[in-house]
Amino acid sequence: MLPYFTKKYGNASEYHRLGMEAKMAVADSRKKVAEVLGAKTAEIVFTSSATESINLSHKGLIENLQNEFKKGERPHVITTKIEHKAVLETLRHMERKGEAQVTYLDVNKRGLIDLVTFKKAIKAQTVLVTIIYVNNEIGTIQPIKNIGKYLKEINKKRKRPIYFHTDATQAINYLDCRVNNLNVDLLSLTGHKINAPKGIGALYVREGVKIIRQMDGGGQEKGLRSGTENVPYIVGIGKALQLTEEDKIKKAKKVALLRDRLIKGVLQIPGVSLTGDKLVRSPHIASFLVDGVEGEAMILALSELGIIASTGSACSAADLAPSHVLTALGIPPEKSHGSLRFSLGKETTPGEIDLVIKVLPGIIKNLRVMAPKF
């Protein structure tokens, strides 16, 4: 990235030497992203984040399809109750404006949707299914490939196709995200989960899927996302995605072993339980409920020892309401406030895992002693 902050600082929309140099860098990064996703370069749109990618795909698709519906009819969307807020708030916004009707699927106690219930939710008006690949709080993996395969089959018989989107933000580092394997039409991701900078994302839009831009301006990104291209960050996400593919399976197995080591150790503490599915979960997320302790207090105590964890999801950390994901799992508010999540990475070591297992019991014990009694 460094040369594109200084020496190669041209605007990728200009035709002078510096501009063409920047344009070539953007094209090269687009090719890298496409290769990782098994897509065509023309199907990749650069955005500022997964949140923007989701807004563009959902609002852009529904807006494009509005004219296909009779007066009084609305496009129908199917999603889950444990989506990231970027999906849930986008859909609620469209509901409030009367642009869409939405079905929010329940999940079981492990965070998995029921495929039979999902199939029953499909209507003649259904145009979009949007389901998160890996949940960012509990790590549960949804059966995206099976859902995509089913939608592909029923679309052969439908007059109005159903488009399929997945938020692959938490999946891209360790799981197969090749779009044709998943049978998805739209896929969103962000850079900062894969060691690219914060402030860059990408959206995959399958060829033939029409969406309407949500930002007006100079018509960059094939008219779908106006604004001068952020060349250094685009270069960064392309290289970061390329690096995720190096020994991907080997790295996923290594991280999963450390995750299991952490889970086994933490569950030895009395009054601690695991959230999410024990087996069908991403290699890098270990999430727990701790009885009698506030999540914020645990995070602060761990942070003093150089251990960085979170409670609920980082995107909702300022919200005092209980986690919508844990609520959807049937966990009462008084228990969900004791949530604790560890996110592992490729650089995580066994020693770091052992340190958590060593210090966490004492932290929890001390906080329980200090907790007010009613």
Image (cartoon, helix red, strand yellow):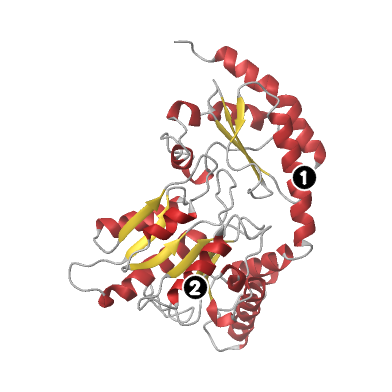
Q: Earlier in the sequence, mark 1 or mark 2?
A: 2
Q: Position of residue 50 (x, y in %)?
A: 51, 60
x 56%, y 23%: residue: 291
Q: Using the numbered discs, state the Cα–Cα distance from disc 1 to disc 2 in whole angstroms.
A: 35 Å
Quadrant of res 169 = bottom right
Query: Looking at the picture, which amino acid does disc 2 mark?
Result: Lys
Amino acid type, residue under disc 1 in the picture: Leu
Is residue 330 found left or right of 173 in the rendered image?
left
Quadrant containing the C terminus is top left
* Residue 46: assigned label: none
Can residue 84 be seen at all in this image of the molecule? yes
Horizontal side of 294 relative to 306 (left or right) equals left
Task: Using the image as rendered, state which of residue 133 and residue 16 is in the foreground.
Answer: 133
Left-right relation of 306 to 323: right
Quadrant position of the N terminus in the picture: bottom right
Mark number displayed over residue 152: 2
Tag 2's secondary structure? helix
Structural crowding at the residue carrying mark 1, measured as other residues with C-alpha within 10 Å and reported as few (<14), some (14–19) or many (≥20): some
* Residue at numbered disc 1: 257
